Image (tube, rainbow, N blue to C red):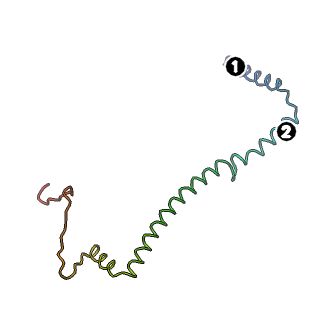
Amino acid sequence: MAIAISSRKLETDRIIGLWRALDFSRVDIVLLLVLLLLQYPLWFGAGSWWNVASLQSQLHQREAHLQELEQRNAKLAAQVQSLEHGDGAIADLARRRLGLIGKNEIFVWVIPHDAPTSNPHKS
């Protein structure tokens, strides 16, 4: 216990000695505190460096998402345009999604070689 107290006293004496070596007056201390108080919003407030960096990161993420949505909308607009002005697009869509075939057409279903097979008799 005595060793802990003496080490704390030595640390306190060292800090006080350093403080006296710097020779701060009360005006200097007040000005330093005012400077620190003025710096606080710059580092930790609403418009701080950290907040701005976080907002910029969110902005980049949202811009990337917006670009993806714009590409999707352009693709959908092209599909709508094709459906409005072309009969071939409607027939192709009916073939792909509904499995319809026209007169004099033969339905061929190609199964890839590496496709997984399901055998109901195998456990």
Residue 85 in picture, x, y percent from top left = 39, 82
Q: Is residue 71 above or below residue 36?
A: below
In the displayed structure, 1 sits above or below 42; it is above
Examine the rendered structure and indicate whether residue 68 appears above or below residue 22.
below
Q: Which numbered mark, 2 or 1, is in the foreground of this view?
A: 2
Quadrant that contains the N terminus = top right
Q: In this orientation, which residue lies closer to the viewer: 41 or 7?
A: 41
User: Which residue in the structure is indicated by mark 2?
Assistant: 30
The percent coordinates of residue 82 (x first, y second) are 39, 77
Viewport quadrant of the C terminus: bottom left
Q: Residue at x 55, y 55 (%)?
A: 60
Instruction: Categorize mark 1 by other alpha carbons within 10 Å: few (<14), some (14-19), many (20+).
Output: few
Q: Amino acid at mark 1?
A: Ser
Element on which disc 1 rests: helix
The tag on residue 118 is none
Q: Marks 1 and 2: in contact by CB < 8 Å?
A: no
Q: Residue at x 82, y 26 (%)?
A: 22
Q: Which residue occupies 67% across, 48% down?
A: 49
Mark closer to the chain start, 2 or 1: 1
Q: Which residue is mark 1?
A: 7
Residue 119 image-quadrant placement: bottom left
Secondary structure at badge 2 equals: helix
Count of all numbered marks drawn on residues in the image: 2
Q: Is residue 34 left or right of residue 115?
A: right
Q: Is residue 92 shown above or below 123?
A: below
Q: Is 26 in front, or is 118?
A: 118
Q: Position of residue 29 (x, y in %)?
A: 84, 35
Mark 2: which amino acid? Val
Pick out the residue farthest to the left.
121
Q: Residues within 10 Å of mark 2 (few under 14, many from 20)?
A: few
